């Protein structure tokens, strides 16, 4: 991996075009040599600007007056530091990690969106400024920018990474994840951030898998139908079909379950849940003199969420829990699910972060999701696929990916 000093210099000198960083650490605080023997000794990483780093303000991509610098690191930053990694700065996020983009550009084509809301983190990794960066996902804010920027993006099982020190917007959805240049690097981060003792960060029981678990044999794969979610570009469909073909060639068993009705219901529940929780989190700002500093899109989202009653919200969560149980049983014999990461390559639109349609179900269910870049479209923009596993099978999913990713890459 890049040393902290190398990453700092690249970020300071190379960010004018990409605009991935909100702020960088003081150069004097960046070590010139790795300290200690931790799993990530000397590795630099970026931190999405909704996660606290001591000594830096957390702006959340907002036009509101910046708060005072954070006193402490977020829990996940503390864990990475303990493993020897070095945070070198805060990366750009869409406003309050919603949809209104910041200034970050896609390193593969500056006229195209890098995705969002974790735009700066994905772009910084894609541009070679850092090997690792933290992001978050509520709908598709990890997987979509990973797809558009052509890097590995991992969203763990909901609750596996502690959110202490994160500006949480949607309490039942927000999940901390990370970007990397390789699956191996992602597994290194997972070995640090994902507990292996069978207990999640919040005290709930997890699956008890270990970071070193290595899957063997041929995988059992589910290809999720796309018709109920949305249309795919030729390049996105080609990446999906090519991935499945190559998996079959290497012995995978592939099934295609019929889930259209469930998918439509889950997408509806996600939208209503997100807006209800977002509205309640930002209501104090809406009813303050600072409301005019919120973007029109965010004000509209808050107003939509305020129209969702507590009764409707509770009913939606009961349906969510029932479907989560059903899906966990339905996919009980499956090692991982293959779906598109995004409907297309990165759009040529700097006023949008693109569509998260293919990511929202997994955010709602809380299942681990991974974007794997597989090649480029004819226009030179990255394409890839999304792999998903059942909850608490994070390490197994990453293990399958490290073993099989070389087989599905093109070129």
Image (cartoon, rainbow, N blue to C red):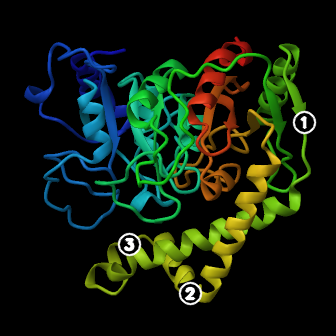
Q: Pinpoint residue 29: horizontal percent, then vertical percent.
A: 11, 29
Per the model, the C-alpha gap separating discs 2 and 3 is 25 Å
Say which mark, if any, is on residue 184.
none
- Circle 1/circle 3 CB separation < 8 Å: no
61 w.r.t. 309: above or below: above
Q: Quadrant of residue 331?
A: top right
Residue depicted at x 34% and y 87%? 287
Name the one closer to the observer, 207 or 300: 207
Q: Pinpoint residue 295: horizontal percent, then vertical percent.
A: 42, 70
Name the one closer to the observer, 153 or 238: 153
Say which mark, if any, is on residue 310.
2
Q: Quadrant of residue 264?
A: bottom right
Identify the secondary structure beneath mark 1. strand
Q: Disc 3 designates what residue?
A: 294
Tell me if I can see residue 380 in this picture. no
Which numbered disc, 1 or 3, marks the residue that appears first in the sequence?
1
Q: Left of 226 or right of it: where is 302? A: left
- Circle 2/circle 1 CB separation < 8 Å: no
Residue depicted at x 78% and y 24%? 219
Which numbered disc, 2 or 3, marks the residue that appears first in the sequence?
3
Q: Pinpoint residue 302: horizontal percent, then vertical percent.
A: 49, 78
Identify the secondary structure beneath mark 3. loop
């Amino acid at each position: 991996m890049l040393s902290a000093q190398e990453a700092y210099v690249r970020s300071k000198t190379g960010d004018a075009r990409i605009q991935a960083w909100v702020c960088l650490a003081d150069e004097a605080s960046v070590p010139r040599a790795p300290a200690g023997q931790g799993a990530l000794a000397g590795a630099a990483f970026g931190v999405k600007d909704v996660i606290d780093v001591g000594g830096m303000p957390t702006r959340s991509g907002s036009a509101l007056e910046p708060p005072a610098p954070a006193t402490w690191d977020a829990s996940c930053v503390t864990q990475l530091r303990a493993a020897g990694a070095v945070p070198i700065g805060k990366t750009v996020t869409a406003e309050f990690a919603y949809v209104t983009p910041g200034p970050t550009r896609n390193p593969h084509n500056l006229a195209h969106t890098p995705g969002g809301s974790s735009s700066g983190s994905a772009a910084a990794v894609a541009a070679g400024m850092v090997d690792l960066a933290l992001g978050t996902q509520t709908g598709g804010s990890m997987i979509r920018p990973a797809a558009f920027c052509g890097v590995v993006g991992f969203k763990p099982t909901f609750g596996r990474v502690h959110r202490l020190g994160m500006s949480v917007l949607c309490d039942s959805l927000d999940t901390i994840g990370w970007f990397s240049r390789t699956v191996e690097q992602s597994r290194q981060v997972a070995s640090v951030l994902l507990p292996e003792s069978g207990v999640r960060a919040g005290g709930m029981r997890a699956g008890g898998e270990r970071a070193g678990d290595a899957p063997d044999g041929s995988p059992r794969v589910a290809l999720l139908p796309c018709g109920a979610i949305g249309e795919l570009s030729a390049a996105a469909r080609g990446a999906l079909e090519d991935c499945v073909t190559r998996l079959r060639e290497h012995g995978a068993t592939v099934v295609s379950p019929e889930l259209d009705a469930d998918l439509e219901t889950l997408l509806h529940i996600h939208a209503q849940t997100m807006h209800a929780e977002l509205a309640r989190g930002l209501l104090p700002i809406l009813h303050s003199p600072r409301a005019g500093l919120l973007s029109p899109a965010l004000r509209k989202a808050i107003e939509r969420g305020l129209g969702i009653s507590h009764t409707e919200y509770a009913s939606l969560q009961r349906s969510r829990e029932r479907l989560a149980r059903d899906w966990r049983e339905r996919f009980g014999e499956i090692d991982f699910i293959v779906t598109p990461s995004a409907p297309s390559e990165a759009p040529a639109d700097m006023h949008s972060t693109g569509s998260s349609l293919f990511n929202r179900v997994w955010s709602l269910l809380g299942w681990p999701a991974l974007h794997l870049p597989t090649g480029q479209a004819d226009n030179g923009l990255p394409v890839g696929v999304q792999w998903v596993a059942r909850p608490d099978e994070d390490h197994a999913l990453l293990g399958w990916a490290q073993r099989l990713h070389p087989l599905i890459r093109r070129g």
